[in-house]
Amino acid sequence: MTATIGVPLYACGGGTIPLLQAWLVDGMSIGSAALLMLAGPATQITNLGALKIVLRPRRFLLYIGFCHTFSLALGLVVNRTM
């Protein structure tokens, strides 16, 4: 779920930290927090706009899919190790 939210939703790193701290206190897992911190900046709307201009549509969708999949995998690994 966090991967799906983290890809379209971006908040700057400084603004995300207090938000994540509150969510961690409320019970969010460390892996989900790591996932959100990775997926958010990788899919910042300004970066996506520039990438869409440079990349072809198929490669652009592959980029978004890779960011989503890699973030999810990293979150799962962090949850299993911590």
Image (cartoon, grey):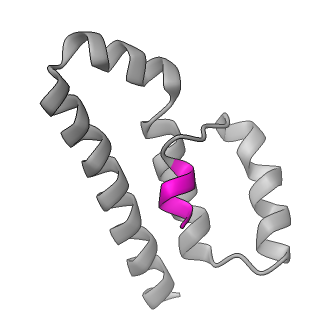
Counting every numbered tag in the picture gives: 0
Confirm whether the magenta stretch covers residue 4.
Answer: yes
Magenta-highlighted residues = 1-6
Identity of the residue drawn at 21% across and 12% down: 54
Confirm whether the magenta stretch covers residue 7.
Answer: no
x%, y% of residue 11? Answer: 67, 37
Please give left or right for residue 21 compared with residue 68 in the image. right
Q: Considering the image in quadrants, where does the N terminus appear?
A: bottom right
The extreme front residue here reads: 57
- When the figure is inspected, residue 17 is found, relative to residue 70, above or below; the finding is above
- When the figure is inspected, residue 46 is found, relative to residue 9, above or below; the finding is above
Q: Assign the magenta stretch its main secondary structure.
A: helix
Identity of the residue drawn at 24% across and 37% down: 61
Please give left or right for residue 44 compared with residue 61 in the image. right
Q: Nearer the viewer, residue 54 or 14?
A: 54
Identity of the residue drawn at 57% across and 53% down: 5
- When the figure is inspected, residue 65 is found, relative to residue 49, above or below; the finding is below
Q: Quadrant of residue 28?
A: bottom right
Q: Quadrant of residue 64?
A: top left
Q: Nearer the viewer, residue 80 or 44?
A: 44
Q: Nearer the viewer, residue 77 or 64?
A: 64
x%, y% of residue 25? Answer: 84, 75
x%, y% of residue 22? Answer: 85, 64
x%, y% of residue 3? Answer: 48, 59
Please give left or right for residue 72 compared with residue 63 in the image. right
